[in-house]
Amino acid sequence: MNETTSSIVSENIILNPQQTGTVGSFPIYVFPGLVMPTIEDIFRKKTEELEAEREIPADDKTVIELGKKYFQANKKNLLEKYQNKYIAILNNKVVGFDKDFSKLADRVYKKFGYQTIYMPFVSEQKRIVKIPSPRIRNS
């Protein structure tokens, strides 16, 4: 079938293709009057569907406070299961754990999207972590 003479017939309407450009040596054809979704439309729709499925609390502070409350209320059970590991708490449940914080964060963010998630280290002792702050020079 020759692409330049192909037509789409739908509901008694005949649409003839028009070449709009090329990609390398391959011609690009469109059918005037036929609306096709773009790849951005497809991804936008899927993203909106996924975001609608997630229950996200109103703000970051609320997420952290709810996670802390859950952690304190269930600390005994969490110590038995996840001693010396990091856990991810979202919507009052543990959604992941790992000895390596970076690996846990990577998995959790891939699964739930980039959002605020409470990820404490489970230990009987309080753990202090020092994180260097970036420095900005005044020019």
Image (tube, rainbow, N blue to C red):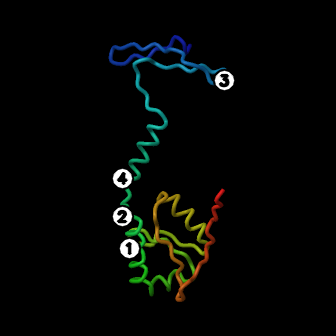
Q: In terms of sequence position, does the residue under pointer 2 or pointer 3 come before the other?
A: 3
Query: Where does residue 45 sit, x and y in percent of width and height?
Result: 41, 42
Tell which circle, 4 or 3, labels the residue nearer the N-terminal end.
Answer: 3
On the rendered structure, is 83 left or right of 42?
right
User: What is the secondary structure assignment of the residue under circle 4?
Assistant: helix
- Circles 4 and 2, Cβ within 8 Å, touching? The answer is no
Marks 4 & 3, CB-CB < 8 Å contact: no
Disc 2 + disc 3, Cβ < 8 Å: no
Can residue 1 be seen here? The reply is: no
User: Which residue does the numbered mark 4 point to in the structure image?
Assistant: 52
Q: Is residue 45 visible?
A: yes
User: Seen in the image, is 63 located left or right of residue 111?
Assistant: left
Observer-nearest of 65 and 18: 65
Q: Identify residue for label 3.
A: 24
| CB atoms of marks 1 and 2 within 8 Å | yes
The residue wearing badge 2 is: 57
**Spatial separation of the CA atoms under disc 4 and disc 3:** 40 Å
Which residue lies at the image location 60% right of the left edge and 75% below the top edge?
Answer: 99
Give the CA separation, mark 3 to mark 1. 55 Å
Dot 2 falls on a residue whose secondary structure is loop
Is the residue 37 above or below the residue 52 in the image? above
Kind of residue at badge 1? Leu
How far apart are labels 1 and 4 at the CA level?
Answer: 21 Å
From what the image shows, is residue 13 above or below residue 46?
A: above
